[in-house]
Image (tube, rainbow, N blue to C red):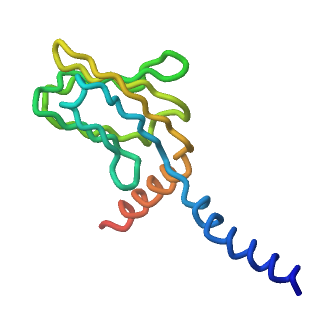
Amino acid sequence: MKLEHIIIFFVLLAFPFRQLQAQNDFAILEKNVNIRAKGLIQKLNTTKDTLILKSDSMINKVYAVNMNYKREVDLSVKNKTVKIPLKKLSIGKHVFVAVQSPVRIVFVVKILRDNSVLLAMEDKNNLASKDDKP
């Protein structure tokens, strides 16, 4: 009888964690918490597949270097807000640099999973919608 209660307890304890594991994030943002970086708001959207940067001052340029020292993002922005899609970035750590003359703010985005299956499904849906049009 006591063994049954212990088994039921562990099953009920483990059940919520099984659901949490199924909803893995696409990316993780490691913000720059330096006092000089407080003017740049760094966040991910709710689906965590787009990086959003906002500032009171002008953002001149944003670039990112991956683990193989290659630039996968290299944007000339010249705006106070920028949204960068993360779907086409490779899996792994990406060091982002936001240039606000003369300050450079460095932060990290880690891409956790490959989005190629979702991109393929999205392309297939777009092709299907194009074929449906007369």
Residue shown at the point (30%, 25%) measured from the top left: 34
Q: Residue at x 13, y 31 (%)?
A: 79
Q: In the current view of this chain or complex, which residue is farthest to the left?
A: 57
Residue ID at (18%, 31%): 39
User: In the picture shown, does residue 128 fall above or below 45?
Assistant: below
Could you tell whether 100 is left or right of 19 in the image? left
On screen, 117 above or below 83?
below
User: Residue 42: x, y in percent?
Assistant: 29, 37
Q: Position of residue 8 (x, y in %)?
A: 77, 80
Looking at the rendered image, the quarter that the C terminus falls into is bottom left
Q: Position of residue 65 (x, y in %)?
A: 43, 20
Quadrant location, the N terminus? bottom right
Between residue 47 and residue 11, name the one nearer to us: 11
The residue nearer to you, when weighing 15 against 89, is 15
Q: Is residue 33 left or right of residue 89?
A: left
> Is residue 127 rendered to the left or right of residue 74?
right
Percent of width and height locating residue 123: 45, 52
Q: Is 134 or 58 nearer to us in this picture? A: 58
In which quarter of the view is residue 126 placed? bottom left
Question: Residue drawn 31% across and 38% down?
Answer: 84
Identify whether 72 is placed above or below 18. Answer: above
Q: Residue furthest front?
A: 2
Determine whether 10 is above or below 48 in the image: below
Q: Residue furthest bottom?
A: 1
